[in-house]
Image (cartoon, helix red, strand yellow):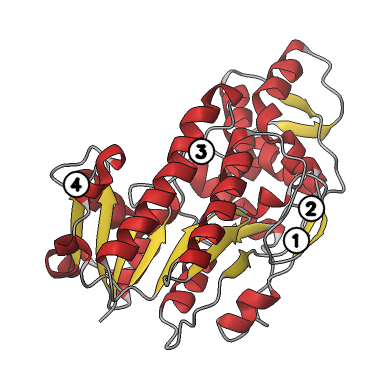
Amino acid sequence: MNRVLITGATGFVGGALAAQFLAQGARVVAISRNDPDGVRTIATVLAAAKGCGLEIVGLLADRLDVIDVDFAELEMSLTADALGDVSEVWHVAAEMSYSAHKLAQSFRTNVGNTNSLYQQVCKHAPACRRFFYVSTAYVAGMSGGEVAEELHTYGPMVNTYQVSKWSAEQSLHLLALRSPLPVTIFRPSVVIGHRRTGWAHRNGFGFYMFLDAMKAIAQAGHKELSVDIVGDSRPDLISIDQLVADACALTFRQHQGVDFEVFHCTGGRSERMADIVRMWGEVAGIRATLGAPVTTLDQRFDRAIEPNRRFANGDWDFSREKLDGAVGGSSLLQPLALEELRRLCSWYIGTSTAAAVAEVG
């Protein structure tokens, strides 16, 4: 039986991964901070299981262990007793800030803690077959275009998160060259909710930042909004259920091999931003059109979405040929259609699609 160590299990991706691993028969060791009794971690994993349509309640007592750690003292927390029979590691936890003011903190977390965890696993987990690191496809930088599944030497970046994730990849590559534990860099594109249920964390991050801002405008009684985004760009969106399916397929491979791997976990591009912006507005209850900000309200919205505007405006063509080859192919994977995105957004703000459309009409 696989015993998978996961960091970040109180987050969106980590919680969903933990729930899926449990549902597929694995044992899970969840590494958490400031959760000495494990209640917060267990609650997140249960919520993820419910959101993904999984039944795991009866499995928690025997298959889920929660270890409260202080990454500043990782050697004291993760000993041979805790790690001895770990078969795989999924390092999901990260500092997500874009702010340049948090550059030092982001490096400590995304680079320093990653190095420390890898070294502890090498030291105390002799049965571990592979160390999986969840990065981001946008370490490629902001140039757009075709992006191969490989380490990138350089790309123009615009925030601390990108820079620290790129640095963590480079650091892990050096560590893997010196150590017997193989590394997989796992790069999701824009992660959104569950394709069937709509479930997601309501944290206003990434794709949902725009929807949250529009909903706030609608709740304030406004009816129209001008959005300054390139209409012909097409974002690459990956649903959380596809992400965990890809991750589990990699984890449960019979032969993990010894190579350093880089994979893009992507869903493909389909819908134009012009149509997505209009859909966001319909779900939120306003009329959203493309254009330069004119009113004070437009300008406030413009400032609110600034951290993610360049990602919305860009066009990246992320290859996932290596990932498809490793998991046995994904010829049936279809990009999310506009009506599927509408359903996800409607779940996120707690309204039905019909109600959202009727409100605009």
Image coordinates of residue 309 in percent, x first then y, are 73, 34
Q: Which mark is residue 96?
A: 3
Of pointers 4 and 2, the one earlier in the residue sequence = 4
Choose mark 3 or mark 2, whichever is in front: 3
Considering depth in this image, is 79 or 235 the residue closer to the camera?
A: 79
Of pointers 3 and 2, the one earlier in the residue sequence = 3
For the residue carrying disc 3, how many other residues have a C-alpha within 10 Å: few (<14), some (14-19), or many (20+)? Answer: some
Question: To which residue does mark 2 refer?
Answer: 234
Q: Secondary structure at mark 3?
A: loop
Q: Secondary structure at mark 1?
A: loop
For the residue carrying disc 1, how many other residues have a C-alpha within 10 Å: few (<14), some (14-19), or many (20+)? Answer: many
Measured in 3D between alpha carbons, the distance from the residue under mark 3 to the one under mark 2, in whole angstroms, is: 23 Å
Callout 4 amino acid: Met
Question: To which residue does mark 4 refer?
Answer: 76
Choose mark 4 or mark 2, whichever is in front: 4
Of pointers 1 and 2, the one earlier in the residue sequence = 2
Measured in 3D between alpha carbons, the distance from the residue under mark 4 to the one under mark 2, in whole angstroms, is: 47 Å
Q: Which mark is residue 350?
A: none
Q: Residue at x 60, y 60 (%)?
A: 238
Residue reaching furthest top?
296
Considering depth in this image, is 107 or 137 the residue closer to the camera?
A: 107
Image coordinates of residue 47 in percent, x first then y, are 31, 53
